Amino acid sequence: MLDWFSHNELTVDSRGRITIPVSVQKKIGEDKKYFMIKMGYEGSVQLFTMDLWEKEYERMAKSHFENSKDRNFLRHFTYGINQVEMDAAGKILIPAVLREKANLNDKVVLTWQFRYFEIWNKEAHDKFHSDDYNLEQTSDEIFARNNADKKSNE
């Protein structure tokens, strides 16, 4: 999966579709033409291959949604969820509800995020990455926390 890393600038056509780059299609595999698409985080849309969606589904199915806060999370997590098909030309339709919510009308960015692809409005993506963000400090905190978690599980 490491070879999936990519950053692609695409255009949404008049029918609300994007064309998945051929290089990404090859990495996904010819047999994988169905995807799950849903609203993501920070205004992005998430696109899962079906095998990765099944893992995400299993992870969510193990969770308990017994109170209103948890149920509200689940409702937001599944907002706009749809199964979509990549056609022979490599096009995927982004459902209207997701295009509207994420403002995916013209230029978009498709990026790989370890378990799924993100689709961003290009301007929102550029703004997100232009904000003052301390990558070094945050990565130190995350890796320290992960190392502490590993030690506590040993």
Image (cartoon, grey):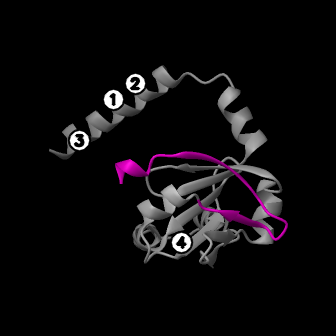
Q: Residue furthest left?
A: 154
* Marks 1,2: beta carbons within 8 A: yes
Q: Secondary structure at mark 1?
A: helix
Question: What is the spatial separation of the Cα atoms under label 1 and label 2, in whole angstroms?
Answer: 6 Å
**Which residue in the protein does label 3 denote?**
150
- For label 2, the SS is helix
Give the magenta-colored segment's residue range.
1-20
Q: Earlier in the sequence, mark 3 or mark 1?
A: 1
Q: Earlier in the sequence, mark 3 or mark 4?
A: 4
Q: Are marks 3 and 1 in contact (CB under 8 Å)?
A: no
Tell me where residue 52 sits by quadrant: bottom left
Q: Is residue 123 left or right of residue 152?
A: right
Please indicate whether residue 101 sits to the left or right of residue 64 in the image: right
**Circle 3 crowding by C-alpha within 10 Å: few under 14, some 14–19, many from 20:** few
Instruction: Report whether residue 108 is seen.
Output: yes
Q: Which residue is mark 2?
A: 140
Q: In the image, what residue type sits under mark 3?
A: Lys
- Is 34 located above or below residue 101 in the figure? below
Nearer to us: label 4 or label 1: 1
Mark 3 to mark 2 CA distance (whole Å): 15 Å
Mark sitting on residue 66: 4
Residue corresponding to mark 1: 144
Tag 4 and tag 1, C-beta contact below 8 Å: no
Residue 66 position within the rendered picture, expressed as x and y whole percent measured from the top left: 53, 72
Residue 140: name its quadrant.
Answer: top left
